[in-house]
Image (cartoon, rainbow, N blue to C red):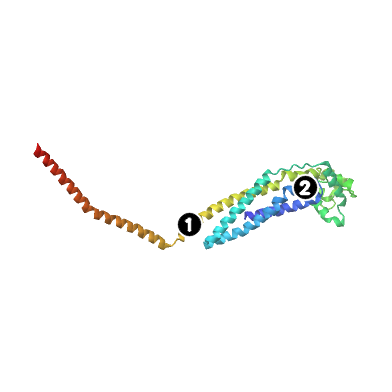
Amino acid sequence: LMSISILGVSAWLRDYLNNVLTLTAETRVEEAVILTYFPVVHPVMIAVCCFLIIVGMLGYCGTVKRNLLLLVWYFGSLLVIFCVELACGVWTYEQEITVPVQWSDMITLKARMTNYGLPRYQWLTHAWNFFQREFKCCGVVYFTDWLEMTELDWPPDSCCVREFPGCSKQAHHEDLSDLYQEGCGKKMYTFLRGTKQLQVLRFLGISIGVTQILAMILTITLLWALYYDRRDPRADQIMALKSDTSQELSCHSMELLKPSLTRIFEHTSMANSFNTHFEMEEL
């Protein structure tokens, strides 16, 4: 279940990343996005979660059928996956983004606004609308960027606080406070640095790591119990027979030694009596 949760968060985050990469193409911000998210979020986390789902199913089958081979394979797979997750977690915590947002990046983003609304750049139009809606921002620095860099007479409707068809035109003529006042440039970098979504992934990663440790402990316990349950009962009978035989031999040996010990004691007593009698005669 936790693997499916991480897959869901990764898929949700992927839509954000695709739109951010669309808007930040050929800038230093794009480099920071790729450096931070893609090495961990896409190849490693998705592959690990998919593999964990398969491993979990096989582990469940091994537990139900009490199959030692499946349980051993399940334990080994969990151990390997845990090591991979631990390495990824250490890497993400140690990796710091040192790429600042430069004014040149802002200019590059503003230059890409000129293609907004063109039929051949529908993907760019979708990316701008998505980002402005989700992050509640407008333009790159301010909403007037749309008026400066495009042929639009007013910003897109995605800049409206309460969006509806023609809302930006109405806000432009009546009340500018109905438009988002903050630009998307800083929001974009805040998304990269603050990484609320990445923190969610880290929390889920830690949770699934703890769950894996508990699963490995329970697997070892189950393997131990199954091993002793499947021991050959004849081996236990042989061990018990050997123990009984040893006890019988010990008792028999003691019985055989009793007469000898009695005779030795009698001879010792007679010798002591003779010595005492001899000493009395001398006196």
| Residue displayed at 12% across by 39% down | 279
Residue 281 - label: none
Percent of width and height locating residue 222:
51, 56
The amino acid type, in three-letter code, at marker 1 is Ala
Residue 193 located left or right of residue 272? right
Q: Residue furthest front?
A: 282
Quarter the C terminus occupies: top left
Question: What residue appears at the point 68 percent right and 55 percent down from the top-left corner?
Answer: 46
Q: Earlier in the sequence, mark 1 or mark 2?
A: 2
Say which element carries label 2: helix
Three-letter amino acid code of the residue under disc 2: Glu
**Residue 69 seen:** yes
Label 2 neighbourhood size at 10 Å, few (<14), some (14-19), many (20+)?
A: some
In the depicted view, which residue is nearer to us: 138 or 193? 193
| Residue at numbered disc 1 | 225
- Provide residue 47's location: percent of width, then percent of height: 67, 56
Q: Nearer the viewer, residue 199 or 165?
A: 199
Q: Quadrant of the N terminus?
A: bottom right
Of all residues shown, which one is farthest toward the top? 283
Cα gap from disc 1 to disc 2, whole angstroms: 53 Å
Q: Is residue 142 visible?
A: no
Q: Nearer the viewer, residue 220 or 18?
A: 220
Circles 1 and 2, Cβ within 8 Å, touching? The answer is no
Residue in front for this viewpoint, 161 or 253: 253
**Looking at the picture, does residue 73 appear above or below residue 108?**
below
Mark 1 burial class by Cα count in 10 Å: few <14, some 14-19, many 20+: few
How far across and how far down the image is residue 50, in percent?
65, 57
Identify residue for label 2: 31
Disc 1 on helix, strand or loop? helix
